[in-house]
Image (cartoon, rainbow, N blue to C red):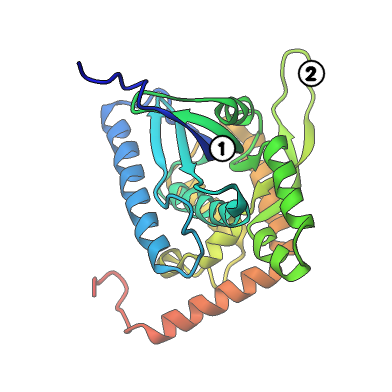
Amino acid sequence: MAESPVATGRAKYGAVAVLDALGVKGKDIKQSLHFLDTFTGLFDELESETRSQVIDASNLTLRPEVRTFQDTIVLTWDLADKDGIFHCLTFLGWRLGGILTQALAQGIPLRGAVSIGNFVQTPMAVLGPAVADAFNWHNKSDWVGVVLTPNAGQVFCDEISSTTTGIAHSLTQFFEFFDVPIKSCRWWPFPRTRRMWAVAWPVEIARQYELAEEFETVRYPLSFWFEHYCRLWKLKVSKAKSKYRNSGNFIAQISRSKAWEIGAARAQVKFRRTAAPSRTPGVSP
């Protein structure tokens, strides 16, 4: 008798990200295929790019396990060794920033949460404390962005406090401590915030060489890029005004607090563009 798929599952320790693709619910078949094709290509590209970068992810699966249902995406990264949590968080901040930026460039704004902990994964399902924690927080924020759950935030703070200032900066450059806007609910219909760690995804705008080629991210502020793609993809800003306004506030803070990282990224983009062969606009090389 063949072994049950459930019996082949095993307990794992790692990261679980649960993301909402905003505006995907209710799409027709053609639009749904565009959504799936976009994400398949996105993760192929990210895996290839990750392998070419000098980042210590030797104890972390580079390509996440991906599961989707309707407008919800579940990503899991298996961490082979708990001692590698520092590199895991650095890797996640970098990769999730790229995922959010490139998905938005394709007209798919994302919102979600990341948890660190134990989970069980089989070909049929993924569940456990880390999954429940991420699901509990993934749709509470009122913006485009990804937060660390309070539990993951505590792990993050423990890692920072246990390292030197220089090493800690290599982690904090990918995250921002921010008053995250929380959606109002029936029992509390007023705007509210919670101080949480969030992925500093706007920094990735400056790092994306291909986006810089499309229009001058080197010259314009990061907020211009965000507004450009909202208009380009006709995102329903008017129906979710607070969500996009809050995202703009986050971009504004990142522009101030991560000015050094943004400047360094733009300098690298300028160098790469100078070194690259000249191109005529609209003509493929």
Instruction: Find out whether the residues at labels 2 and 1 contact each other: C-beta distance under 8 Å.
Output: no
Task: Say if 143 sits above or below 198 in the image.
Answer: above
Visible residue check, residue 11 = yes
Task: Say if 113 sits above or below 210 in the image.
Answer: above
Q: Which residue is label 1 attached to?
A: 111
For image coordinates 62% across by 28% down, the residue present is 133
Task: Determine crowd level at label 1: few under 14, some 14-19, many 20+ residues with C-alpha closer than 10 A.
Answer: many
For image coordinates 50% across by 41% down, the residue present is 109
Identify which amino acid the numbered label 2 is placed on. Trp
Viewer-nearest residue: 164 or 180: 164
Task: Say if 125 sits above or below 117 in the image.
Answer: above
Image mark count: 2
Q: Earlier in the sequence, mark 2 or mark 1?
A: 1
Percent x, y of residue 67: 39, 32
Percent x, y of residue 159: 72, 53
Q: Which residue is label 2 attached to?
A: 188
Viewer-nearest residue: 267 or 122: 122
Element marked by disc 1: strand
